[in-house]
Image (cartoon, helix red, strand yellow):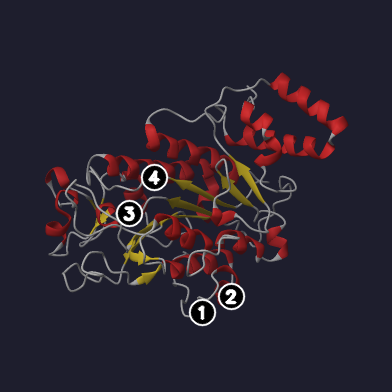
Amino acid sequence: MPHAPTRRSVLLAGGAVFGAANLPRSAHAAAGRDPRLIVLVLRGALDGLAAVGPAGDPDYAGLHGALALGRDGQTAGLPLDGFFLLNPGMPQFARLFRDKQAAVIHAVASPYRERSHFDGQDVLESGFPKPGRTASGWLNRAIDVLPRGERTGHARGLAVGAVAPLILRGSASVLGWAPTSLPAAGDDLAMRLLDMYRGSDPALAASLGQALDIEKIAGRDGGKMPGGGEAAVMKQVAEGAARLIAAGDGPRIAAMAFDGWDTHANEGGPTGRLAMLLSGLDGAFAAFESGLGSSWKDTVVVAVTEFGRTARINGTTGTDHGTATVAFLAGGAVRGGRVIADWPGLSSSALHENRDLRPTTDLRAVLKGVLADHLGLSSEVLSQKVFPDSIGVPPMKDLIGT
């Protein structure tokens, strides 16, 4: 049965493509590889110590209290190795980890240290070392510096959301798709609008047609947002985005943001709110794996957040703004089965400012490593164009499988 475009996509189609000239129609894989890169921005600051718990650290349980993961009982986490446990809300990621298609980078942070959500997200998405320079995002600049043959076909970006996230704003054209809860308009209305604008405004008609194409690919259910809270939303958004990214003529680089990770109170740890959020992220990873099909083998999904949370829990069984946290990598192209960490420890003397997990890995090194080995960008381009003023941060090696 034909997919009915949503009323939102019909009425706002001209803005739905975020400046893209047309939907790419001539994607050609080179040398047997057709790489996809998907970046998930977890806005609000993820508690990395409750997501991936260092159960082998003697100070962990005492500091993180009711939010700490244990090896058994009601607080039991999913084993990753002899030292780290995964939050029980992420069984699919644990499976991917066992299959060596997922990895965790722990004690990681951007160069930002002041703990403001607004500025932290600015640094995370802009790729600049300081806030306030928000004209473009690092992922858009990465698309813009890809070789011309790559950029004109499958390397176009996909921005998911009503407004393109900062990470994908810039001079490189990107497609846009936003799920909506509005009622669907019928095919008849859409076709009548197309016919009307073809005669009076051909450019608008072309944009409208493209938006309808995007909607038809992205969702069989009208693009409606589901019930069930943030976890269900993450999964369905990933399902729709996967359909677009898997299309032979679709974009190959995508970004989307998931809100709600600011867990100041009643965080929950192994159960409760955080575990529910992590189950949504887990569902998104699984939806990309399923939706991308055979393209999963050439895919990297990266999940990042603006900073971590305090090592000590607060008086409302939550955590406050912190510093280091975790980054997740998943995909058939990932050299997985590893928790990569230069572990700093959680003793009082080891904590950053006596309160936070101390960062030992620059998040830009992780992102540079993915862009270098997965998309072929040089260290020079990465340090000068994609992440300006980062010459002292070399790309992390061996994140991508051969």
**Which callout, 1 or 3, points at the residue further toward the start of the chain?**
3
Amino acid bearing label 3: Arg
Q: Which of marks 2 and 3 is in front?
A: 2
Label 2 crowd (10 A; few <14 / some 14-19 / many >=20): few
The label on residue 391 is: 1
Task: State if disc 3 and disc 1 touch (CB < 8 Å).
Answer: no
Q: Name the residue under label 4.
A: 281
| Residue 283 location, quadrant | top left
Identify the residue position indicated by label 3 in the image. 98
Residue holding disc 2: 384
**In the displayed image of the protein, which residue is found farthest to the right?**
199
Amino acid residing under circle 2: Gln
Could you tell which of marks 1 and 4 lies nearer the N-terminus? Answer: 4
Q: Which mark is residue 242?
A: none
- Residue at x 46% of width, y 61% of height: 124
Q: Is mark 4 on a helix, strand or loop?
A: helix
Residue 341 image offset from top left, x and y in percent:
31, 68
Work out whether residue 283 or residue 10 is closer to the camera in this orientation and state it: 10
Q: Distance between the residues labelled 1 and 4?
A: 32 Å
